[in-house]
Amino acid sequence: MINSTKYVIGVMSGTSLDGIDIVYVKINYTENYSFEILNAATIPYSNEWKLKLKEGFHLSGEKLVKLDADYGIFLANTILNFIKENSVQKLDFIASHGHTIFHNPAENYTFQIGNGPYISSITGIKTICNFRVQDVARGGQGAPLVPIGDKLLFSEYDYCLNLGGFSNISFSEKEQRIAYDICPVNIVLNHYVAPLKMEYDDKGALASTGNLDKNLLEELNSLVFYSDAKPKSLGYEFVVDTIFPIIDKCNLTIRDILRTFVEHVAIQISRKMNSNSGKTMLVTGGGAFNTFLMERLQAYTKTQLIIPEIPEETIINYKEALVFALLGFLKDEGKINCLKSVTGARKNHSSGMIFEL
């Protein structure tokens, strides 16, 4: 690739339903890749949109198609507002992940809503999206996709850990990038604080006052998924069909559920870290702000957990949106953006669909 500089808007919506993460980033390639986040914002979902996205899993075909279109229109207008509010002038394209409704690569499908043609048509800007489907079609998990960004942008860390709706880890092993989903995190914690009219357990304050239930912890830790060979990935289906039923049958208080699940997360992540020799780990995603979770994780490992601080704190919240901007950059250049060593696809490839004006 010749030297290249592009201005990109990256858009991400995670399963934890915190909101839409948008970054305006300058990406450079000379001998290596570098980036500069110029503007960033999280646009919280209204209660109406949260409900729509939660119900997407249960909709009929026709209603799901309508949701796909409606969400694409919503994303387009949200992006236009971001462009106006930040006086964005230079912009080569939008790279949008969309919002995952279904993810079941074992059955050969993954589905993200946020219709690309609507985004490009309404904004008048080239849009790159649908980054997961091609990987599943080529025998891969379609996830995680962020590790290409870990490799190209954050290679100084031995591990990269993202704590979003799900946790996933990325590291180099025998000159290959290895990555996989570990366990659910915020998608479960946020679910159980919702009856308290809370969006999330701030800093893990509630969890820290709960009691550990050893029976629940043992059952969670013994789930078959955790012993499955990689590559592997998780979707909302796993949480609804497996995690929630196990927890709900225990009839525990909310505090005890949170306390026990935090311990479960810390144990599962530390097992992956301690099986390798890395010394430093970059921690990003909303879970990085969960002080109690970080304390429990550090208790199980000698690896140094590095949580970016101001001004780099932007990376905690926007790393995924940043990396999808990079995925779009690579797709636009016709370069590999999906690694078979990560997803298990038959070959490395350049994934995504481009919608021109």
Image (cartoon, grey):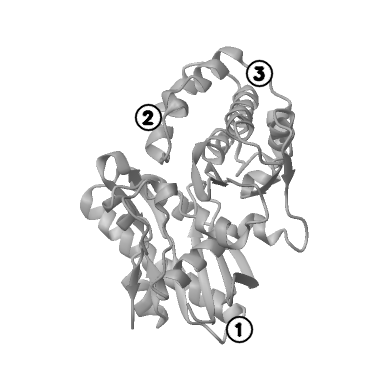
Tag 2 near tag 1, CB within 8 Å: no
Outermost residue on the front side: it is 174
> Label 2: few (<14), some or many (≥20) within 10 Å?
few
Say left or right for 218 vs 241: right
Amino acid, disc 2: Asp
- From this viewpoint, is residue 314 visible? yes
Amino acid, disc 1: Ser
Outermost residue on the bottom side: it is 89
The CA span between labels 3 and 1 is 50 Å
Instruction: Please tell me which residue is depicted at 73% across the width and 48% down the height of the picture.
Output: 306
Instruction: Please tell me which residue is depicted at 42% across the width and 41% down the height of the picture.
Output: 233
Camera-side residue of 262 and 335: 335
Give the labeled residue for mark 1. Answer: 87
Say left or right for 308 vs 249: right
Give the labeled residue for mark 2. Answer: 241
> Label 3: few (<14), some or many (≥20) within 10 Å?
many
Helix, strand or loop at mark 2: helix
Say left or right for 10 vs 99: right
Give the labeled residue for mark 3. Answer: 212
Amino acid, disc 3: Leu
The numbered mark, 3 or 1, whose residue comes first in the sequence reads: 1
Outermost residue on the top side: it is 215
Say left or right for 198 vs 349: right
Residue 96 position, x and y percent, is: 44, 65
Helix, strand or loop at mark 3: loop
The numbered mark, 3 or 2, whose residue comes first in the sequence reads: 3
Give the image quarter of residue 287.
top right
Q: Quadrant of the C terminus?
A: bottom left
Helix, strand or loop at mark 1: loop
